[in-house]
Amino acid sequence: MNEETVLETLKAIAFSDFTEYIWIEDGAVRIRDSRDLSPAQRSAIAGIKDSGKGVEIKLHDKQKALELLVKYLGLFERPEEDAAIRVELAGIPEEWTE
């Protein structure tokens, strides 16, 4: 498994939507045939079981996948210099800045 495969799998999990797997039609829950699911959609599934009362589809943890992607991409990491608030005063009378 390479980096690209891992990132694609995390993306599939992070942006999965239950309506890709089930939907409600005329008051009945419908389940998409697993043969019609893309590899990305299949990778987002944590498990499927028949409870006797119906089928349960569990997706992998989206929040965890998003956290890992954010960490990998460094979206919330900023150098301390960027974290400081800077204010530049323009057009202020000189006596105010002394």
Image (cartoon, rainbow, N blue to C red):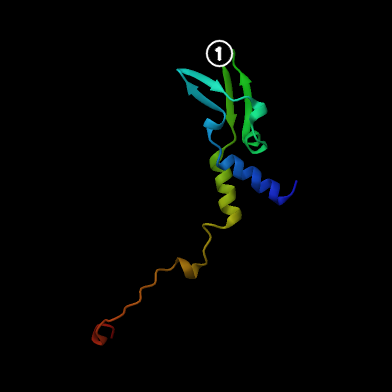
In the image: residue 43, left or right of residue 84: right
Reply above or below: 76 against 61.
below
Label 1 crowd (10 A; few <14 / some 14-19 / many >=20) = few
Q: Quadrant of residue 62?
A: top right
* Residue 29 x %, y %: 51, 20
Secondary-structure class at tag 1: loop
Reply above or below: 91 against 54.
below
Image point (54%, 26%), residue name: 22
Image point (56%, 32%), residue name: 20
* Residue 57 x %, y %: 58, 26
In this view, the residue in front, 96 or 21, is 21
* Residue 38 x %, y %: 65, 35
Q: Quadrant of residue 26?
A: top left
In the image: residue 54, left or right of residue 88: right
Task: Give the labeled residue for mark 1.
Answer: 53
In this view, the residue in front, 40 or 2, is 40
Amino acid identity at mark 1: Lys
Image point (55%, 46%), residue name: 66
